[in-house]
Image (spheres, rainbow, N blue to C red):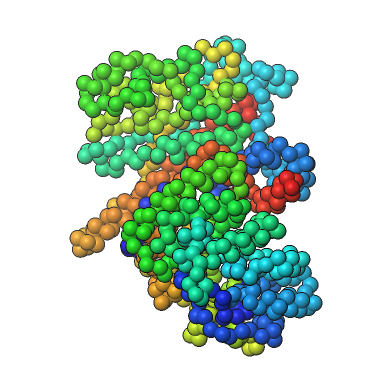
Amino acid sequence: MHLTLHLTDRCNLACRYCYARHGTADMSFETACAAIEKCATGPDCGIVFFGGEPLLRAPLMWQIMDWCEACRPGRFHYKVTTNGTLLDEAFLDEAVRRGLHVALSHDGARAAHDAFRVDSAGAGTFEAVDAALARLLERRPYSPVLATVNPETADRLAESVQGLQAKGVQYLILSMNFAGSWTDAALQTLVKEFRKLADWHEENYRKERKFYFSPFDKRIASRVFPERSNSCRLGMRQISVGPDGRLFPCVQFVGRAEYAIGTAVAGIDEARREALYRCNERDKPECAGCALERRCHNKCGCLNLQTTGSLERIPAVLCEYERMVFPLADRLATRLYRARNALFLQRHYNPAFPILSFLEDLGAS
Amino acid sequence: MKIQAVQAYRGASGYPTLAEIQRTPELLARVPARWEQSSGFAALLGLLALATAPRAEAADEAVPVAAPAAASPDAQPSETAVAQQARKTAAVVAPMLEEALDQDGRGSFGCISVCPATFMPEDEALELIRTELEAAGLRLQEGVELDNVMAPVQKPEDAKPPSGPRDWEKGNELGPRPVRFDWADPERAVYVDYLAQRDYRTWQGRMVSVNNSFDFAALARKVAEAYGQHPATNKTVFGVFFEPLADPGVAQPKLEGLSSEQARRASWESERLEAAIKGEKSRDKLRRQVRHFVEFLKKEGVVGAPP
């Protein structure tokens, strides 16, 4: 179980694709503790600090971690997702000392980043975030970077991804802004970029450059582990806690009263959670008979709600995207498998790969 | 932009699931070069192997065992069929699976055909064979040629396909050409050939026309006989596999009483089902041919003996 604490609605940026409703609400320490008490079940629970911009509440973050470790030492692991503008040396020192993992939003190429990730005055934040990325990777080379792809900057995708790798990023999670104004032309551009990236990623494997690229590697994993569900199991594996203490099944539901599944004080309304879960799990009629149905993201409740206004309806652009990327990912994997590429085999089929990879890097350093 | 169910997708069949690869654990013995080059890391790998002993044991079982008997006579005190054949300086062609010879590999296509043949994609078939043979411990190379092993007719790779009988006659004039074996383990002198649709032309010496029937089982016998004539100087083993042309056994849908749209849909669904079943059956049948061959190799001590 992961508990995502939305420490604040406030953000110091005004990213043009952001889905969040920026307000002024802040979470209190008491609310955070109550939510953890009620919802953080299981022997190993992740606490994710989220926002708004969670680093605006850095002192609260440390306070919550202190409390967690005092109550149940070693039971929790911690992660924060940040826009990077407040990611200074002092914060990173503290994060490393406390074992807080940091994920950074960075859209890659300057033009792609500055077109959307702007401050309240509309100024791009590339310089600040790029400097933060360097600081972060120096301390935590495996930190994940989250990049968002927009129709207006789709032609920068390959440049962005390759540029991030050149800066030392080893773990890149790409998110599509499906709520953007995608057109057939933009999708054509995107597929060209993905083709370039498929060749380039093959080269990564051949040259034994360790780089996790979610559009391909995650889809390959969906073939390697067919028993894994493509569903996020809405509300069952992760719960978001709004600043006011209301509980929601995922991050994009926060603030929408009709999707609340309890409160930090009263705990989870199991009937409500179950109802939303079942609603999200229902097979989509338009996907009946689709060979990719078990692997694609058609059951991402957050995405469906954001783009179609309903958990049960999928956006056409998602379908187009999945039909574009799956063949590229599968062809890439087929080529690598036929070449018996050692890094490919180890990464995708050896459960010990993360530890082996880590040990290798330890040996190299 | 539209939502569109993908009705037929084979893109993922070119690489295995985790469950499938666990049958070939030696594949995971392939490690990145950097891991191999680091002595400290190699030590860590050793520790990890100890920590995951059950998995490592499973891997050991599938790792290649015996060198050819001729190379290590002490390891093979009793004279096997292979050794006997070797003394006669003739190659051994592994016996083919009787059940496959009796039941599989026959079909037709064209306007006369009620249940048209569906061929396995050749690369999929070759990959399946490779996976099974590597699991048995063979170290395979692709496209190996062997002196004096010729196919009766073979067009060069870059030749235009024949467009009519006259072209084909010209093709015939090319005469015998060396066989490029689909997979070979030269160290163990094992050579395997998979007879796919295009091999029909190579071996039968006739064009595949719009109406045609196939008998891959008969072709396999012919090819095996040809390989058996190879004057081997060591114990060379040939394996011959063939396109199974599986029959899906799907009943035709009853279309009476359906609207034309419903009938079209039912017919289309039935075709999809048929193709899926054929694919699965073909893979299963070919796998059985290959495993039969592997059993033979084990019996002959070419690869690890059965437990």
Against A75, residue A349 (above or below) is above
Q: Quadrant of residue A169?
A: bottom right
On the image, the x and y values in percent for residue A39 come to 65, 79
Q: Is residue B71 visible?
A: yes
Residue B78: x percent and y percent? Answer: 69, 20
Pick the front one: A96 or B88: A96
Say which residue appears at 62% left-offset and 79% top-offset: A7
Residue at screen point 45% across, 65% down: A115
Q: Residue at x 56, y 57 (%)?
A: A172
Tell me if A324 is positioned left or right of A253 in this view: left
Work out whether residue B214 or residue A109 is closer to the camera in this orientation and state it: A109
- Relative image position of residue A70 (x, y in whole percent): 80, 77
Quarter of the image for residue B255 reads bottom left
Residue at 60% from the left image edge and 69% from the top image edge: A85
Measured as percent of width and height from the top left, residue A185 is found at 33, 58
**Observer-nearest of A265 and A172:** A172
**Looking at the image, residue A264 lies above or below residue B71:** below
